Amino acid sequence: MTVTIAREGSIAVVTVDNPPVNALSQALRQGLLEAVTELDADATVKAVVLICAGRTFIAGADVNEFGKPPQPPHLPDVVAHIEAAKKPWVAAIHGSALGGGLEVALGCAYRVALASASLGLPEVKLGIIPGAGGTVRLPRLIGPAAAVDLVTSGSPVSAKKAEGLGLVDALVDGDLRAGAIGFANGIAEKPLPQPISRRAVPAVEAGFWENAEKAVAAKAKREVAPLRALASVRRASETDFSDAMAFERETFLALRGSVQAAALRHVFFAERAAPRPPELAGIAPRDIRSAAVIGGGTMGAGIAAALRDAGLPVVLIERDAAAVERGLANVRAIYDGSVKRGRMTQALADERMAGVTGGDDYALLADTDLVIEAVFEDLAVKRAVFEKLSSVCRPDAVLATNTSYLDPNAISDGVSHPERFLGLHFFSPAHIMKLLEIVPTGATSPEVLATGFALARLLAKIPVRAGICDGFIGNRILKVTRAQAERLLLSGATPSAVDAALRAFGLPMGPFEAQDLGGLDIAAFQRKAARERGDIPFAPVAERLCSIQRFGQKSGGGWYDYQPGDRVPKPSETVAAIIAEEAAGKRQRVWNEADIADAIVLPMVNEATRILEERVALRSADIDLVKIHGYGFPRWRGGPMHYAEARGLGDVVAVLDRLAADGLADPPCDGLRRAAEVGGFSALER
Ligand code: 3HC
Ligand code: NAI
């Protein structure tokens, strides 16, 4: 039974039990409707508490039903019934009251919550807007300004904040059920409060909606839902309840079937599936209660902060006392930045810092559960580190490398108990970026692999398993992005045109601006290593820029020129002249934005398909997560693989064939042709 009713004197307690998150399935909607009818008819009942079993209050509509036609009873009707009930309903909230869950709570006469609960309307994150009165009742309850914030950001607020907004009537300490019953007894004899639907929306000052529109549009960029959500709150503030409800529902149903909503739903489920790969089901991870990082540079400091933020004590090992001080200062700078941006109190920053012990003596690691190496990208240096770790660490300590391009098998050669070794590839800045590539070697045991995934959960990161190849999943695709960008330059496009086209596609930055920001020297170093291995990397213009010390912003110029103290890229005549020399004799064409985006994104898909075929990635959705969380690929496009599928793989193959015929890309790989025949990448996932 998803809905059960118990009696506590004159209070009825309606319990929703629909694991895992009490999503509003058809059965639950039906159950709530019947509960209203039953309790209205029961003269012994004076008030009703609506509470949920399990980890959370109702977390929203059932996202699994979004691909299908809506089934009655529809949620707006269920909420209207609760609101029209003859007895006051009290929503008792723990965990999260999200989306449709909050809308149900808004139908109730009162809302009480544990302080640990959170409330929100995250629909825009799924490419839709609330569909059961969220945008209509919320401004009537908490005013348009607060409603606009909640609805257009999709971010939940804490129960305490919700109480301040008037969204929650009382916070409950201790037992929620007992507290809510006490509250219900307190209001049972009072007249029913005016239903939210009948309240007026407080007036706004002149220019409010125009300003809100500008702010939301600037933030949403090409995401459709936030502006539509705003329009719905505005409509709710300017017309009557039933007109506003009809407008909201119409928008909700239209967006539910949109391309962006399908993409965002795909990412929602991919993110939830990522931490629990089926192949590791039932495998217990090792306990991680303490951690160490070797190397306190850019990555080591960020990884140390990420580990501390998850509550682990951290030891930071560097080469000598001076380097230890520099490493600790790097970690401190991260916390200072958080305090400065108001993300953390000074006291919390001090507490985090106090949990980092610096040193140059590996003996400090004798009892550490997990050690992550982030020293120079040099095989000999890394191997020397692991030789020491092999001799000082407990045999069951997990040892990890953060290498970007080196072969973890080679790094772990000679490590004692090699089953405890794996790659944990963080992204910079490591305390912020959500992606974690988890790279097992041939020897890594399933428990240690599971420990990598458990660590990702602890650090609130998105784990993706990657096989061993040059650059794993993300950087291997990045190489193709960059090579394609240069191919475009040699065939008539300019760096600014390429960057503008990829921004128009939805990336936060184009490939050339991004290289100028990160520094061209890093990739040059990698190409040198690749050449030493016998590879032939393609970067003719970047090589020339590096040869004249144009390394990007840090050297005053790279793909663009920069004025001192200014980060705005200016087209460079020097670069244009180099491009012209390299392009001499090659066919030039006129590029538009869409063709530029195709010439970069579709070859990325081609490489990603090879990655899937080679089992370097196990699932195409994993590749989407890598590009979204590590490289800024627009979430609303669903990642490159979802984008390609949604566009039609036949079209992708046709465009790649044309580019290949002009010498502007590799031809589609066999896997891509096969996937196109069956209409999806799942055929390659085996
Ligand atoms: N519908 C269907 N399944 C859902 C779901 C939903 N709304 N929310 C979560 N789930 C599933 C997940 O897929 C996962 O399934 P699995 O165990 O089979 O992998 C399981 O519930 C647990 O989810 P999490 O791993 O995310 O659990 P957490 O405890 O970490 O988080 C949560 C719980 C905060 C509730 C989080 O799941 C969440 O944010 N869910 C989404 C909430 C949401 O977006 N609601 C709005 C839906 S749209 C709507 O309501 C429209 C309305 O206006 C008409
Ligand atoms: P970095 O140069 O900023 O830091 C390296 C640190 O390691 C220095 O502080 C150095 O003193 C220390 N170190 C060197 N040898 C050591 C030893 N034997 N013992 C202890 N400490 C030692 O380098 P960065 O950028 O932090 O990179 C570290 C690793 O992370 C590399 O393998 C790199 O490929 C990888 N990586 C880098 C990313 C980036 O964006 N910078 C992203 C992901 C991985």
Image (cartoon, rainbow, N blue to C red):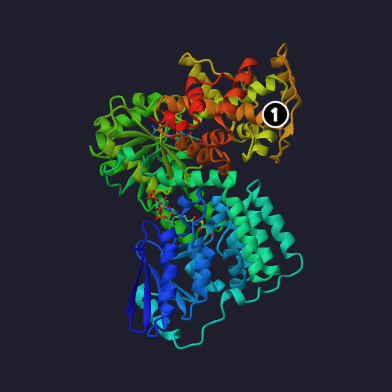
Q: Is residue 530 above or below residue 511?
A: above
The residue most toward the bottom is 189
Q: Is 172 located above or below residue 192 in the figure?
A: above
- Seen from the viewer's position, the closer of residues 494 and 93 is 93
Residue 645 position by quadrant: top right
Helix, strand or loop at mark 1: helix
Q: Position of residue 293 (x, y in %)?
A: 38, 41
Which quarter of the frame holds ligand 1?
A: bottom left
Q: Left or right? Give the position of 210 relative to 65.
A: right
Q: x, y (%) of residue 610?
A: 47, 24
Mark 1 crowdedness (10 Å alpha carbons): few <14, some 14-19, many ≥20: many
**Residue furthest toward the top?**
585
Where is residue 325, by image quadrant? top left
19, 125: nearer the viewer: 19
- Quadrant assignment, res 137: bottom right
Specify whether residue 344 is in view.
yes
State the count of labels: 1
Q: Is residue 558 visible?
A: no
Please identify the quadrant where the N terminus is shown: bottom left
Query: Which quadrant, please, contains the C terminus?
Result: top left
Tell me the residue that label 1 is attached to.
Answer: 495
| Residue 157: image location, x then y, percent | 52, 63
| Residue drawn at the location 42% of the way across and 54% of the way down | 352
Disc 1 residue: CB within 8 Å of ligand 2: no
- On the picture, is 286 further left or further right than 556? left
Q: The residue under label 1 is which amino acid type? A: Pro
Task: Give the residue displayed 44% in from the left and 75% down from the top.
Answer: 37
Is 616 placed above or below 394 here?
Answer: above
- Give coordinates of residue 189: x percent, y percent: 45, 88
Left or right of 14 on screen, residue 521: right
